[in-house]
């Protein structure tokens, strides 16, 4: 039951059902979709919802928290730095081993990544991660 707007205020289409309840359903469902990594579906639901509170979720900034791929400790500062715990350099390309200053892509399965162009070239011919970790990365499944 998508909420409708009347004069800028959201209201439920069902009589005697509070907009707060409907809004909680939406927010819970969006959270569930995000937990299941269905980010596109969650974003579509937010975009198409008439409730200004739910719709405002698309106006919030995105924060990415990164952990060291070696020791797992959360990183502080930029991604092109060294881990404060194990002192390993992070934010480097898995192909050329240089710092990535542009578009960085990574495999959610093994956590390795690098320059978009290098990944496209590598995975155009290979399926296994170039680091030797053995993971069968599926970064570009539509090839």
Image (cartoon, rainbow, N blue to C red):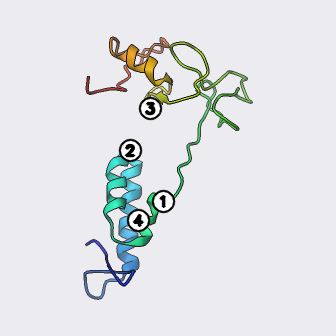
Q: Which quadrant of the structure image shows residue 93?
A: top right
Mark 4 — residue? 55
User: Residue under circle 3?
Assistant: 108
Quarter containing the N terminus: bottom left
Residue at the outermost bottom position? 16
Q: Locate residue 5, reporting x and y percent.
A: 33, 79
User: Decide: marks 2, 3 in contact (CB < 8 A)?
Assistant: yes
Neighbours of disc 1 within 10 Å: few (<14), some (14-19), many (20+): few
User: What distance separates the C-alpha of mark 2 from that of mark 3?
Assistant: 11 Å
Residue 54: % across, % down: 41, 67
User: What whole-number distance in Å separates the C-alpha atoms at marks 1 and 2?
Assistant: 20 Å
Q: x, y percentage for residue 67? A: 60, 34
**First along the sequence among labels 1 and 3:** 1
Residue holding disc 1? 59
Contact (Cβ within 8 Å) of mark 4 with mark 1: yes
In the picture of the structure, the residue carrying the numbered disc 2 is: 37
CA–CA distance in space, label 4 to label 2: 19 Å
Q: Are marks 1 and 3 in contact (CB under 8 Å)?
A: no
- SS of the residue under disc 2: loop
Location of residue 128 with respect to 11 vertically, above or below? above
């Amino acid at each position: 039951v998508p909420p409708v707007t009347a004069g800028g205020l959201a209201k439920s289409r069902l009589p005697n059902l509070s907009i707060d309840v409907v809004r909680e359903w939406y927010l819970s469902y969006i959270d569930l979709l995000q937990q299941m990594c269905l980010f596109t579906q969650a974003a579509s639901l937010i975009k198409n919802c008439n409730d200004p509170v739910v719709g405002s979720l698309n106006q919030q900034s995105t924060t990415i928290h990164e952990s060291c791929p070696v020791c797992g400790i959360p990183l502080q500062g930029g991604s092109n730095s060294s881990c404060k715990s194990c002192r390993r350099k992070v934010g480097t390309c898995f192909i050329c081993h240089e710092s990535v200053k542009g578009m960085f892509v990574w495999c959610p399965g093994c956590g390795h990544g690098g320059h978009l162009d290098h990944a496209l070239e590598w995975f155009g011919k290979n399926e296994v991660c170039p680091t030797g970790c053995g993971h069968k990365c599926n970064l570009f499944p539509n090839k």
